[in-house]
Image: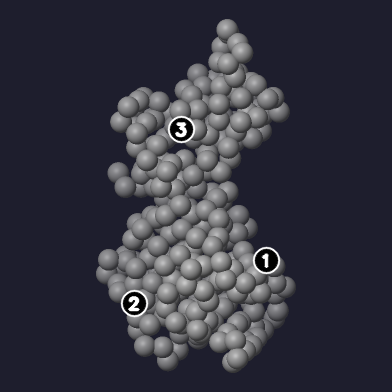
Amino acid sequence: MDGPNDADATVRLACGDRPSVRDGITAERVVSVLFGTDVEAWRTGWQRTAAGPPSREAVVDASDVTRSGAASSTQVMANGGLAYTILGREAGNERVLDALASHLDGAPPGTVDLVIDDLAPVAARDGPDSAVAFTDRFVARFAERANRIAIGYARGGPAEVVSRIGDRVDSLVGTDAETVAVERLSREDPTTFGYVRRHWAEAKRGIEACDRNYPQSKQVHAALTDPETTPRTLGATLSGLVTLGALDTWSETVGPTRYDLTAYRPDRAWAIGAAVETGASDD
């Protein structure tokens, strides 16, 4: 597919909590796709942005929040500058894209900003492949017609999605601090960075599966099903996550290192993984 450098629109991926996906959206006309928000909550969220709501917005609601219907319906609220189409979660990718296209009919190229509230529900419900496929079709179909494209991806979704759509976007925001930390680790301790790069996802799963507050690496390893790591390689990965600020060690021991899982920061671990995956996709 043609990447963003071949199109007029700039494409931005915003990781983290909403409303960061709306930052930089200043067009008077916006078309939004909702996978994780309903129309009312989405419209209210514009009030938390510096620019406020657009003068005119069309919304395609394909979220889990809204019940699906056999036929989509479009409602127009002329006084509020809003038109919205309700599809619900069962709508396939092409149906959502066709609804988007109908709201772009008649708009001069480069005058509309396009926003996806959050791809994470698509990845969680239908798998990372579906989220990536939707992004591919979305950018290929609309990049030459839009002014800006902003795509949201909430922390907690599969981080591999970030790396797989990284070459479709012009900028990635929301993992800046973690990217700096990861780059520093790769320079200062490339061996530990290598373990984090290969095994961060398994380490994250082990931490979240372990029922101990202060385990050794072998105890975290024992909580995993069919691990690719050994206790030693997992321990090196956990050490890297400590350096990167995702968890701490428990200092009250003179034996093998124990990890303080009460200080575990899942959002930080996810952002580290996204930063690692994005860096890997650039190699």
Query: To which residue does mark 1 refer?
Result: 64
Q: Residue at x 34, y 68 (%)?
A: 10
Question: Could you tell whether 55 is left or right of 186 in the image?
Answer: right
Name above or below for residue 270 compared with residue 186: below
Element at badge 3? loop
Query: To which residue does mark 3 refer?
Result: 244
Residue 232 position in % (x across, y down): 50, 18
Q: Closer to the camera, 172 or 100?
A: 172
Q: Does residue 246 appear in the picture of this structure?
A: yes
Question: Could you tell whether 3 is left or right of 114 in the image?
Answer: left
Query: To which residue does mark 2 refer?
Result: 144
Tag 3: Cα neighbours inside 10 Å, few (<14), some, or many (≥20)? many
Residue 132 position in % (x across, y down): 47, 59
Question: Quadrant of the rendered structure where residue 210 is?
Answer: top right
Q: Closer to the camera, 250 or 140?
A: 250
Q: CA distance from mark 3 to mark 1?
A: 35 Å
